[in-house]
Amino acid sequence: MSKVAFRTLGCKVNQIDTEQIKEEFIINGYLIVDFDEVADIYIINTCTVTHVSDRKSRALIRRAVRNNPNAIVAAIGCTAQVNPQKLADIEGVNLVIGNKEKENVVQIIEKYKNNEQKRNLIYAEPITKNVKLKPIIFSKAHERTRAFVKIQDGCQSFCSYCIVPFARGPVRSKLPQDVLIELKQLLILGYKEIVLTGIHTGFYGTDLDDIDLLGLLKTILQETKQYNFRLRLSSVEPLEVTDDLIDLMKNEKKLCHHFHIPLQSGSDKILKDMNRRYSRKHYEELVLKIAREIPGIAIAADVMVGFPTEEDTDFQDTFELINNLPLSHLHVFKYSKRPGTKAATMDSLVDGKEKNRRSNKLRDLAEEKNRDFILNHIGLEMDLLVERQISDYKYRGLTSNYIEVEFSSKINWIGEFAKVILEETDVKGSLVRGTLIN
């Protein structure tokens, strides 16, 4: 039995793509092994969103070659889509497969194995709107406690700093009936939380007739009433969080009380330079409305520092906005120049040292806001999806609003809902200790 090893970089969508590919290998008789083991095939699912992820992708490819110089090494994914030749030039690489052909990796490798003239091959054709998404029907539960369903792929917003539209192509939505087929199979396999995700999740259905993200959510909830599970929504852009979506999350118990709404900057000038289509005021009013309508909800944001035109006053606008908003989680990114994007042609006002200073300042603020959010929940009784066991009698899991809780039990709770009282935090205030009450 041939052995195949995987390593994935980047976003949740990339991780889902890898799980889909693993399933294809399993049903074709391959054995999945750890990346550090000697395998017959190594597949590196690359990310190109920053120069750091590019570098990590190349390092993993070289590591695979060292693990077994005689193995087939396939570099797939986003870097393979936008810069295939750079990967093909790495010694030991056999196949470079972009996102368009990613789901056909098994067939491509089988064809390569049967070809007597071995040479590195590139599959990186442009992605078009007619490249449709197919459902993934898993035959068994994979490693994760929570399952992810990719409801769409692609983006056509072309933010000035972002390489993603070039790597992922235009928006393509999975048919609602296919989403349901895939999701119900995951529920049958025993998953208790399903995360709906995509590259531009809020644009779901813009390429389909009579369906949008809200309609999809309502359809899923209607068709899965018999299952005990919860549904989590991944990142949604500010202009796509509608009043109706807020109302649905407020009133539907199965929808996790958790919004992830990218901010990127709190400066109107920088938002315009980034080609973001909302204002500081719109974002502020949206977050305040959500927090007012759904008490205790977790609201996460992405923010970028060091955009080429970001002056100190722009950064201060960002800091002050975040400081004054009821955000629970903050993901801080330093701007990374991506060739081919509009921002890559701009002269930068921010050096590396200043980028680090701004990043560190926001990260400190993020820790403070997360700690405050958690402390507001001490003493409350909450449902927990238990994700892992950390010692003989200790377990950890996540609440609907994304608080990690640790509790003790002699019973194995992994993959199940447990009811706990949140009692205290650790020294940093990031981990909550609770007591099991059921």
Image (tube, helix red, strand yellow):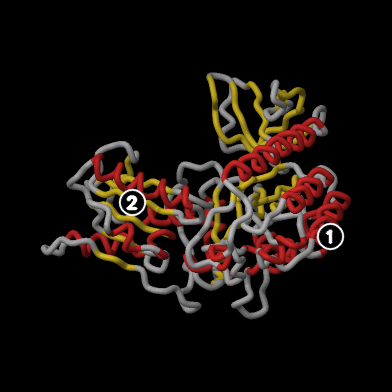
**Label located before the other in sequence (1 or 2):** 2
Give the percent coordinates (x, y) of residue 305.
Answer: 65, 49
Closer to the camera in the image, 111 or 353: 353
Q: Residues within 10 Å of mark 1 (few under 14, many from 20)?
A: few
Q: Which mark is residue 82?
A: none
User: Could you tell me which secondary element the residue under label 1 belongs to?
Assistant: helix
- At x 73%, y 37%, the residue is 365
Give the percent coordinates (x, y) of residue 206.
Answer: 63, 75
Q: Which mark is residue 281?
A: 1
Give the percent coordinates (x, y) of residue 94.
Answer: 24, 57
- At x 71%, y 55%, the residue is 265
Name the residue type under label 2: Ile
Q: Can see residue 153? A: no
Quarter of the figure that contains the C terminus? top right
- At x 71%, y 60%, the residue is 270
Per the image, the residue denoted by label 2 is 43
Name the residue type under label 1: Lys
Closest to the camera, between mark 1 and mark 2, is 1
Q: State whether residue 311 is above or below residue 343.
A: above
Closer to the camera in the image, 187 or 90: 90
Query: In the picture provided, is 33 more to the left or to the right than 224?
Result: left
Q: State whether residue 317 is above or below residue 406.
A: below
User: Could you tell me which secondary element the residue under label 2 belongs to?
Assistant: strand
Q: Quadrant of residue 404?
A: top right
